[in-house]
Amino acid sequence: MNLAPDSDAALVLVGHGSTKNDMSAHPVRAQAETLRQRGLFAEVHAAFWKEPPFVAGILDRIETTTVFVVPFFISEGYFSQIAIPAALGFPELVSPEDRILVHAGRTIIYTRPVGVHPSLTGVLLARARQVVTEHPFPLKPPSAAISLFIAGHGTPQNANNRAAVDAHVERIRRAADYPAVHSVFLEEEPRIAACYELAPTRHIVMVPCFLSDGLHVVEDIPVLLGEPEAVVRQRLATGMPTWRNPTERQGKLVWYARAAGTEAHLPDVVLELVKEARGWLSAGKTRR
């Protein structure tokens, strides 16, 4: 998308990070570098909750008077809605006004999470198309012959996680010609393994609605799809993909896409969120 450069603004992408999985932070760092190369901001930083550079101290490293903070999360959950804003000095986030903080001559704007923006739907669709294009065995099936599944985490403790995934599924149903499009989850019904019963076609494409290739994506979901756990762990230990595209399971041919976090279109989602936040500033929705 087109966004005017701002020589006095910084952009911060904030992810969860991990002390156990180096790949968790990779998409945040990679997309921060991509956005840095576009030259739209005076500074672009990556920060994390669980690993350095930590979000709690990131503002001390920034010199600009305006800072856009974009949470690199799928949904408005505990970390993106409570823990990270609190670490930055924000109050409870209820309205756009609560997402703009003026302190010591600096304006900090905390956007909505990447995963709730409608343009992420296009990123998930791109992943679905990409995986069958890259692995057209025995032939690339048309979308009309594919049942598409969007896999989320889900949790009974936070309805927002499921709501974000379901919203993308509804938009895909309206925009694409797949005969079946469903949400499936790790911790809610329908579960990921239910895809075999729900799919009316022989071809299945599973796209993880996650932003990084963490253990849920590279280990848990392949096992739930039927890959032996020992095989998955062996592949993981040797740096191999933990799912071979396509793999036949329960009479279905299954393609499993990569997480959305490194998709080439994702920086445009970030910029859409910044554009939205600039609208809040223009409307004068500022908390001091």
Image (spheres, rainbow, N blue to C red):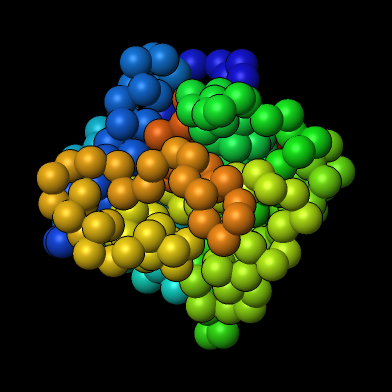
Q: Residue furthest bottom?
A: 157
Residue 242 at x, y = what percent? 31, 49
Q: Is residue 213 left or right of residue 98?
A: left
- Total residue callouts: 0
Res. 265 image quadrant = top right
In the rendered image, which quarter contains the N terminus?
A: top right
279 vs 135, nearest the viewer:
135
56 vs 171, nearest the viewer:
171
Q: Is residue 37 left or right of residue 21?
A: right
> What residue is shown at x 58% (from left), y 78% (from top)?
188
Residue 27 at x, y = what percent? 34, 39
Residue 17 at x, y = what percent? 26, 55
Q: Is residue 217 visible?
A: yes
Q: Is residue 4 above or below residue 138?
A: above
Q: Is residue 66 visible?
A: no
> What residue is shown at x 39% (from left), y 24% (from top)?
35
50 vs 273, nearest the viewer:
50
Residue 167 at x, y = what percent? 73, 56
> What residue is shown at x 38% (from left), y 60% (from top)?
227
272 vs 178, nearest the viewer:
178
> What residue is shown at x 30% (from left), y 25% (from top)?
33
